């Protein structure tokens, strides 16, 4: 039990988490992508509490998490074959599909859209949690709206600990990036958000996809708001050597978020190397915790560089650009 009454209890008690969720309460849950702020997706009060706790605008729809394909089919009137082909390969995992919704899903969850975003997460704790519930979980990332997504239980505690009773601790997220969101229109597969499943892996199965351009005005993908996933400290993207030289001259304290190189004359507390060996998966796992670390460091700006635009580098660059957007 936690002795500090205004903080969430952190543990691995799945039964306790289920009990809270059945009572309509919210629980922090681990997934392989990021930690979620979960509530009963069929309970309008729980869903309202999710929006309020995150201070998330009601026009930004939630992803519904289920334990298996039977549950996924129960909440959609139709499962397009292209999306089924992807689900069969990538579920459980970091893929979200947009399906026509049934009446069972409250309009609140989908912000009035007639499609529902559905995913089967692969994290074993949350999978077990879901398989023992007779309702799906609406679960956006467990952070205040617009801030960096949490990738470990302590991140959730830091920001939402005083608003929820329990955080299920599943360790560090193994992917560390949000899910790839995929839909289909007139037989054309569309990626609405880049994420944990690389575009190339999707194209191998369904052929060329359309990546919806970043937009803050497209009502179909509010999660693609231009300025999102942002630290409070300003982020500048560019050529690191040039930026570092520039800020040295200015005499301003800066942090560095680099892909694979360390700057020997910069204190370690002021730099994060995402993957010394240049591995995209490792870089993805370290991205959000690295941003948080630098956001807490005593620096007035975070200097960052883009990764090669391939594989998970695409999704990482997408997050970096959003973090740097004004
Ligand atoms: P989050 O749960 O914070 O990772 O974000 C969920 C994102 O999924 C939203 O911001 C939307 O971009 C997207 N999404 C959820 N439901 C739908 C839907 N029915 N249609 C289109 N996009 C959706
Ligand atoms: Mg989010």
Image (cartoon, rainbow, N blue to C red):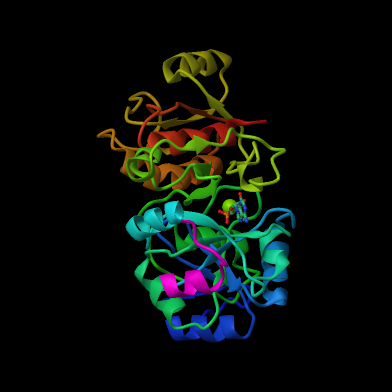
Question: Image height check: is 213 above or below 134?
Answer: above
Q: Is residue 117 visible?
A: yes
Q: Residue at x 58, y 35 (%)?
A: 322
**In what quadrant of the picture does the C terminus appear?**
top right
- Out of 121 and 98, give the one closest to the viewer: 98
Question: Image height check: is 300 above or below 195?
Answer: above
x and y, in percent, of residue 312 in the image: 38, 39
Q: Quadrant of residue 62?
A: bottom right
* Residue at the outermost left position: 277
In the visual, does 229 lie left or right of 258?
right
Q: Residue at x 28, y 37 (%)?
A: 279
x and y, in percent, of residue 199 in the image: 40, 39
In the visual, does 264 lie left or right of 51?
left
Q: Is residue 270 visible?
A: no
Question: Image height check: is 86 above or below 167?
Answer: above
x and y, in percent, of residue 288 in the image: 47, 46
Residue range highlighted in magenta: 69-80
Label tally: 0
Queried whether the magenta region covers residue 70, the answer comes back as yes
Question: Image height check: is 241 above or below 6?
Answer: above
- Out of 137 and 230, give the one closest to the viewer: 137
Queried whether the magenta region covers residue 133, the answer comes back as no
Q: Residue at x 44, y 83 (%)?
A: 132
- Out of 154 and 102, give the one closest to the viewer: 102
x and y, in percent, of residue 282 in the image: 32, 43
């Amino acid at each position: 039990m936690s002795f500090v009454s205004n903080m969430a209890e952190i543990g691995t008690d799945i039964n306790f988490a289920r009990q809270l969720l059945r009572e309509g309460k919210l629980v922090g849950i681990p997934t392989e992508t990021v930690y979620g702020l979960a509530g009963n997706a069929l309970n309008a009060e729980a869903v309202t509490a999710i929006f309020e706790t995150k201070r998330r605008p009601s026009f930004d729809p939630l992803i519904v998490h289920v334990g298996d394909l039977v549950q996924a089919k129960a909440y959609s009137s139709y499962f397009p074959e292209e999306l089924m082909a992807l689900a069969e390969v990538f579920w459980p995992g970091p893929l979200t599909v947009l399906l026509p919704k049934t009446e069972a899903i409250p309009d609140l969850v989908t912000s009035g859209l007639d499609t529902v975003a559905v995913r089967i997460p692969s994290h074993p704790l949350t999978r077990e949690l879901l398989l023992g519930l007779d309702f799906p979980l609406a679960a956006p990332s467990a952070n205040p709206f617009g801030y960096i997504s949490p990738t470990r239980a302590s991140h959730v505690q830091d920001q939402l600990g005083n608003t929820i009773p329990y955080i299920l601790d599943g360790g560090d997220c193994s992917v560390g990036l949000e899910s790839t969101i995929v839909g289909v229109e007139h037989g054309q597969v569309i990626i609405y958000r880049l994420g944990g499943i690389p575009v190339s892996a999707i194209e191998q199965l369904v052929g060329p996809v359309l990546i919806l351009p970043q937009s803050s005005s497209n009502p179909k993908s509010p999660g693609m708001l231009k300025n999102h996933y942002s630290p409070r400290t300003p982020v500048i993207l560019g050529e690191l050597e040039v930026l570092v030289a520039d800020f040295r001259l200015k005499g301003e304290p800066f942090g560095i978020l680099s892909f694979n190189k360390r700057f020997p004359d910069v204190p370690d507390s002021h730099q994060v190397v995402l993957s010394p060996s240049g591995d995209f998966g490792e870089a993805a796992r370290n991205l959000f915790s690295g941003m948080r670390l630098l956001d807490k460091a005593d620096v007035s700006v975070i200097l960052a560089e883009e990764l090669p635009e391939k594989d998970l580098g695409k999704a990482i660059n997408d997050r970096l650009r959003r973090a740097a957007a004004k």
